[in-house]
Image (cartoon, grey):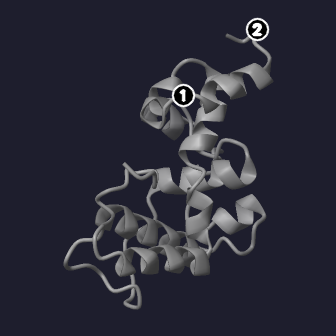
Amino acid sequence: MDLLPPEIVRQIVANVPKPSLPSCRLVCRTFNTFAFAILFSHIPHWLDYKTSHQAVLSLVHDVYNRPAVMWSPWASEPDLPVDRVFMGIVWKLLVKTDPPGFSLISQEGIEAIEDLVQLTPQNFAELSEKEEMTENRLKTAQNRFLLHRNYSRKFDWSGTRL
C-alpha cells in the first residue's frame, strides 16, 4: 500500500462509505491519515462556541428529529472532565501530529519513561502553542458535542444523517 501515491489513496478513502472508515483506518498509516481526517472533520466545529451553539439550537427547533425532552441550549453544560481520546483527536486535527504522551507502548512502558510529557487539558494550550485552547474551551466543546450526539437520534456519531 505504501507504493500508491497519496493522491490515489485520498481518492480511494474519499469514496469509502462512512460506516467502513473505521476499518479503513486499520489498512496502513496512509489510509489511517486520510480516513481520520474524514471521520473527525466535524470536531473543530464544536470548538467554536457560536457554531456549536447554532448546531444545538437547530436540533432544538427540529421537532421531528429531536427527543421530546432535552437539555436547554441556554443551560450550563455538565461539568465532565475532558476525555483523553477527545483531546487527542482535537490535537491531531489542529496540530497535525500525534499528541505528546499518546503512544502504542504498554502502560508499563509509559511509566518506565520518566521524561515523557503527558498531554492534559491544563497544558494543551501551552504544548500546542494555541493560547485559545483552554481547558474550559475543550470541556465545553466536548460536552456540547456529546449532548448533541446523544439527542440527535437520526444522526450517526459523526454527525451524518442516517
Residue 41: image location, x then y, percent = 60, 51
Earlier-in-chain disc, 2 versus 1 = 2
Which residue is pictured at 73% across the width and 46% down the height?
A: 96
Residue closest to the eye, 44 or 103 = 44
Please indicate, yes or no, whether residue 57 appears anywhere in the rendered image: yes
Residue 3's label in the rendered image is 2
Residue sitting at x 60%, y 56%:
90
Task: Give 25 or 60, whichever is nearer the viewer.
Answer: 60
Q: For mark 1, what is the residue? A: 16
Say what amino acid the circle numbered 1 marks. Answer: Val
Quarter of the image holding residue 34?
top right
* Number of marks in picture: 2
In the rendered structure, the answer to whether residue 136 lies left or right of residue 91 reads left
Dot 2 falls on a residue whose secondary structure is loop
Residue 88's spot in the image, x, y percent?
A: 56, 50
| 83 over 117 or under it: above or below | below
